[in-house]
Image (cartoon, rainbow, N blue to C red):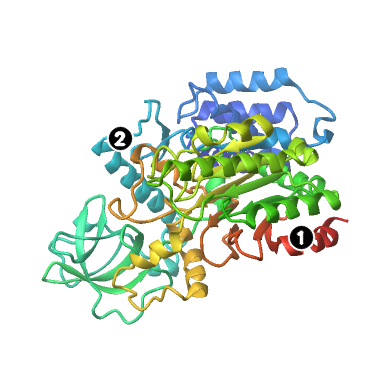
Amino acid sequence: MADARQRTIIKVFRKYSNSLGPDVIEFLETILDQHEIEDAEVESSIDTLAHEYNKQDDALMKVSIEVLQRVYESLQDQGQRPGAEKEALDPDAHLFVVDAFEMPLWHWSQERGTFEKVSTPLTMSASADSRVLAMRDRLNIIKQSVLRNEHFAPSTLPSRDRERLVTLRSTKQLLGRSGERFLLLGMLAHNKEGKLCIEDADGSVELDYSKLDEPGDGLFTEGGFALVEGEYTDEGTLEIIAIGQPPCEPRETSRSIYGHIDFLGKGATSLLEDTSLSVRVHRELADINFFFLSDVWLDHPRTLPGLQKMFQNCIDNRFIPKLIVLCGNFTSKSISHGQGRDVQRYQENFDALADLIASYPSITRTTHFVLVPGPLDITVNSTLPRRPLLSTFTGRLKAKIPKIHFATNPCRIKFFHQEIVVFREDSMARMLRNIVGVKPDARSDDLKRFVSHICSWCNLFWTKGIFAPLTINIHATLSDFDHAMRLYPLPTAVILADKYDRYKITYTGCHVFNPGRFVGAAFVFSTYQPAQMNSEEWSELGLSRFIRSSFL
């Protein structure tokens, strides 16, 4: 029995990248015996101690018994709070809009095999070293999750399957080994001669895809990461046999390992806490809804009347959404080089929006509004992540709407255990314009195919690193804030607001959707239900039917 408990103790702390000495294991077993913890509750009890231990500033990777003793005594002092679990959930107290520039930076440490928090100030004008470090982080985060995948992580027990396992290699291991087959993980790029190559932390090798029959699922863009299998030739090239996307790691797996790390800066929760919150949100907050609208052209004559009808439908049916996210562009044409009158109209449109929202007091008092700038909107910077809308244009909105948030692009919404990412960028067209030669037959009008590729890009487009896997010369990002573009661990939901047709798809537990464009006669948008972790596509004309059928 003691051996089984010891294995459980070691497994739980290993999840947090901790190692244990014999004295710590003995101390933990003593605690379990003193409290007569049943075998079924050992893992959850130890997880609570491990989670609290890793919150301490002086916590070491090799668990310190002094720090662990302090954590245990602190939990004892807190005692049990009967009835606390029965307290009603307050959605406003657990709703956070996370600014991209306020997220803490966590670098991946090869030496420690985990994330390390950066304490130095971050700047908009980063150094060349920070650009290199950002790219290394992208690759290393993908690699560490790939190596945990069952197809790459060998079992400690001997079996026939071990012979079929695929082993990742480095480009430096190719030298002098022509005629052998290798599997590489790296970034697709073009060298100085314009030839396609794959780069990793140790170097690069030119790719020869002339004999490749059919690449794997996905669109392969310059700056994107891929798994490439091929034979190294005497000419110093890798003759591709197969190319595909890295396997996707579910959110639960990542959270079980790094649940103690506060990636968003809003407080870390364990996987057990996430599970408990998920059950309670599903049971107690089933009627909570978020609205997502994109391309809310305030200079279009039909936009404000369309918003008015949407608000009125909510009032008439006594249904008030908890959150309404309005994504740009908030103008139908760029005014960055326009005349003074164009800028004045831009501000007047925001003032008109403020007056419209304020004319519905029940919505103004209850609903959180989030405004995310689009590519044509006026912000401090044009690189990603983008700063919020200039305060010059939003004065009346701030004055009249108490629960308004001027968000960065991208931004994150933390709601209890859920992480929702909102990104407004015309990324589909950008991706299709930068496809490399391994799949030259992709067509820009093949949207269904493109959506299926977005699922494959979960491996590198969300899960493993960046929203737009394009090199800096294609799509500039602020390297000190590259972690704000990172989607690891995999979020609960991702809203890719784009100018193309709307869609929704769930892949490896992450729900992804495009709400469509709130312009024209249909006024399309999407609603997201946190209790169901699912979205619905609607128009202003169909909203009344949606409310009646779902909530009344």
380 relative to 521 in the view: left or right: left
Q: Amino acid at mark 2?
A: Ala
78 relative to 203 in the view: left or right: right
Label drawn at residue 482: none
Asked where in the image residue 213 lies, by quadrant, the reply is bottom left
Quadrant where the N terminus is found in the figure: top right
194 relative to 426 in the view: left or right: left
Asked where in the image residue 183 lies, by quadrant, the reply is bottom left
**One can see residue 415 in this view:** no
Q: Which residue is mark 2?
A: 126
Quadrant where the C terminus is found in the figure: bottom right
Residue reaching furthest front? 341
Q: Residues within 10 Å of mark 1 (few under 14, many from 20)?
A: many
> Where in the figure is residue 388, as x and y percent of width and height?
50, 38
Does 470 sit above or below residue 179?
Answer: above
> Where in the figure is residue 106, as x and y percent of width and height?
42, 36
Label drawn at residue 543: 1
In three-dimensional space, the C-alpha distance between marks 2 and 1, rounded to whole angstroms, equals 46 Å
Q: Nearer the viewer, residue 521 or 14?
A: 521
Residue at position x 54%, y 20% in the image: 67
Q: Secondary structure at mark 2?
A: loop
Q: Residues within 10 Å of mark 2 (few under 14, many from 20)?
A: few
Q: Nearer the viewer, residue 132 or 374?
A: 374
First reached walking from the N terminus: tag 2 or tag 1: 2
**One can see residue 486 in this view:** yes
Q: Secondary structure at mark 1?
A: helix
> Where in the figure is residue 545, as x and y percent of width and height?
81, 63
Counting labels gives 2
